[in-house]
Amino acid sequence: MKTVIRKTLACSALMLAGVLAIGQAAAQHNGPLLAAIHGDHRSDLNKARDVYRSPYDTLTFFGIEPHHTVIEAWPGGGWYTEILAPYLKENGKLIAATYDRSDNPEQGWMTGSNAAFARLIDSNTELYGDIEISQQLTQSQSAIAPAGTVDAIVDFRNAHNWLGMGADNVVMAWHAALKPGGVVGIVDHRWPADQAAIPGNGYIHEQQLIDLMTAHGFTLAGRSEINANPNDPKDHPNGVWMLPPNLRGLDDETRARNIRIGESDRMTLKFIKN
């Protein structure tokens, strides 16, 4: 009888430990990052893209903490900004490294993109806090932050552009801004390693980025399949922009097909400054 009681108590203890472990794991997911991702300030349209962009897992993989100083390179329409800014507002800092802000920018469209981003952050200063605005040049050197002051730099779906615009300048600016051991996290459209790249289709080889980063004083610390999409056939005549969210230049049949495919297959790479 005593043996049965001891076994019952042992089983109960194991069950309780399991419940506590589940509760603790859930509690770990109820932090500031999850609150920012599920905040009411994000539109239903933007939240619907979480399934393809996995913001919680991606930022966790990069090791972004709420007390960090983080640079978001070329934030574009601010999809990640509306997560990062409230997440870092209280104890950290977000620096938005926008496009060339001069009167004669590197590309004419950059002025309009910068203006649209400014409207976004000005629309809710209480939510976004004091985002610091910098600029990331490609055709010349630029100081995107005081040297050695940044914990992490994140770059989402920009590398396929800047690789052909002045990649060395971009990566050297990142290296200068980061603290020793600082992180660069890159997500971009992935082209198959065994196929020759097709210029202008928006996809790039992982190894091209890895070689560039390691040549400029970074070590590849990890890669993840968080943002992979094995359903992406990468056979789009007009490039990756034929997939969501752009769905550019499609007839009804191809549009329906590409919506079923979803957003592109993407690499997720984490680098550490040597």
Image: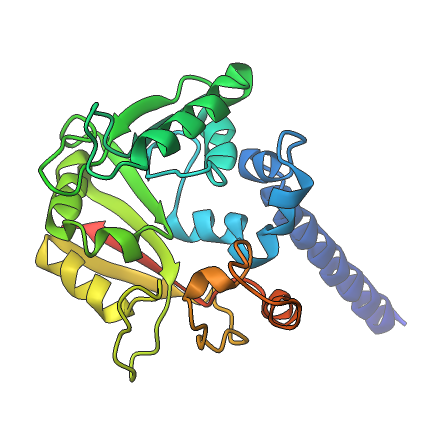
Place of residue 266 in the rendered image (x, y in percent of width and height, measured from the top left) = 42, 64
Relative horizontal placement of residue 119, taking residue 195 as reference (left or right): right
- Examine the rendered structure and indicate whether residue 67 appears above or below residue 80: above
Left or right of residue 256, residue 174 in this image: left
Residue 220 position by quadrant: bottom left
Residue 115 vs 2, above or below: the answer is: above
Q: Position of residue 88 (x, y in %)?
A: 44, 28
Quadrant where the image shows the N terminus = bottom right
Q: Name the residue: 42% across, 67% down.
A: 238
Of residues 157 and 131, which is closer to you in this image?
A: 157
Residue beneath the point at 65% across and 53% down: 21
Left or right of 208: which side holds 113? Answer: right
Residue 6 vertical placement versus 16 (above, below): below
How far across and how far down the image is residue 28, in percent? 58, 44
Q: Nearer the viewer, residue 47 or 118?
A: 118
Among the 4 quarters of the image, the one containing residue 269: bottom left
Q: Nearer the viewer, residue 78 or 61?
A: 78
Q: Which residue lies at the image location 20% right of the left edge and 28% below the top edge?
A: 145
How far across and down, in percent of the image, does residue 225 sit? 45, 67
